Image (cartoon, rainbow, N blue to C red):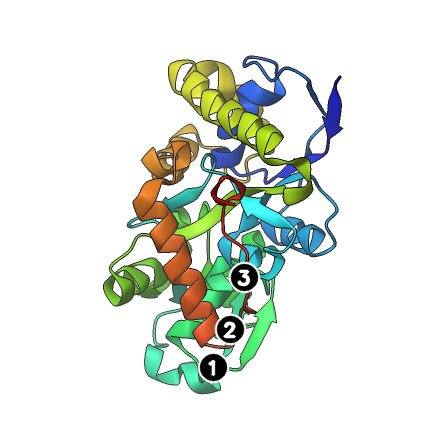
Amino acid sequence: MTDTYSIGYSPCPNDTYIFYALIHGKVELSGVQLDPPLLEDVEALNSRAVNTDLDITKLSFHALGHVLDNYCVLSAGSALGRGCGPLLVAKPGFDSTMLADAKIAIPGRLTTANLLFRMYAPKSGDLVEHRFDTIMDAVINEEVDAGVIIHESRFTYKEQGLVCLQDLGSWWEETSGYPIPLGCIAAKRSLGKERIAQIDRAIYNSIVWADKNRDECFPYIRHYAQEMDREVMQNHIDLYVNTYSKDLGTEGIKAVEQFLEYGRNAKIIPNSSQQLQCSYE
């Protein structure tokens, strides 16, 4: 019997790198048929998860905290690490003492970037949602006073004449002692533990395949990347696809649990009795 599942992930280089082999039949996934993947900005995927639209999906860890009743996190596919968090940037002359009265661009209500910023600057209330790839322009054009940038923007903001007010990932690491959980791959709990475990292994194998066949992946990655420069794409992959992407492991799970707990204590994420991973149930 073959089961058919819907799947969604972002067009960012780390996700297209992770999923290339799986989507192109380079790794085994017997008994499972995947629909053509839906590639959307992570905040759009976050919103879809609130509506339980997709069976397997990329999510911000912030969004995961809102949908734990229906989704569990997989061990493979996550973006989590040190020195890779969102950055709060502004034009020269603006500083962090001005944040309380400033207009701040965020890349979506359910993004990890938004949760981090709200924990870092709880008095800042004027938050404006922008698609992640338009935030630097919004700051440059003075539509906002500062912005929280993610993805490729991390590598290009200096070229745009912006300065970093705070590395929010570093702030989290110093505050909690854990690496920053950015995004994950989640599956509907209704798929069942055996199917979820099978899909999890296939994603792991997809990463291993990509590590051995990088050049074959790049035309697919370049097709969707916002930043076409090969070096920037490679830097993006090297930063966000790491040991935790293959297996969250004990430290990764503890980091996620701590992150969600901070969000709950700040009254931003709802309480949940569900375990993070279905295999733990």
Residue 180 appears in the figure: no
Task: Please provide percent x and percent y for residue 6.
Answer: 72, 34
User: Residue at 34% across / 78% down in the picture?
Assistant: 96
On screen, residue 260 above or below 182: below
Q: CA distance from mark 3 to mark 2?
A: 33 Å
**257 w.r.t. 27: above or below:** below
Whole-number angstrom distance, CA of label 3 to CA of label 1: 30 Å
Residue displayed at 50% across by 39% down: 279
Q: Which residue is mark 3?
A: 273
User: Type of residue at label 3?
Assistant: Ser
**Which numbered disc, 3 or 1, marks the residue that appears first in the sequence?**
1
Residue linked to disc 2: 104
Q: In terms of depth relative to the viewer, which is nearer, 43 or 201?
A: 201
Mark 1 Cα-neighbour bin, 10 Å: few <14, some 14–19, many ≥20: some
Name which residue type carries label 1: Ser
Residue located 48% across and 75% down the image: 145
- In the image, residue 56 above or below residue 257: above
For discs 3 and 2, the disc positioned in front in the rendered view: 3
Mark 3 lies on a secondary structure that is: loop
Q: In the image shown, does 82 or 50 lie closer to the viewer?
A: 50
Circle 1 is placed at which residue position? 124
Identify the residue at horizontal 43%, vertical 14% (top origin).
213
Q: In terms of image quadrants, where is residue 262?
A: bottom left
Task: Give yes or no for contact between labels 2 and 1 (Cβ–Cβ under 8 Å).
Answer: yes
Q: Where residue 12 sits: x, y (%)? A: 53, 39
Q: Nearer the viewer, mark 3 or mark 1?
A: 3
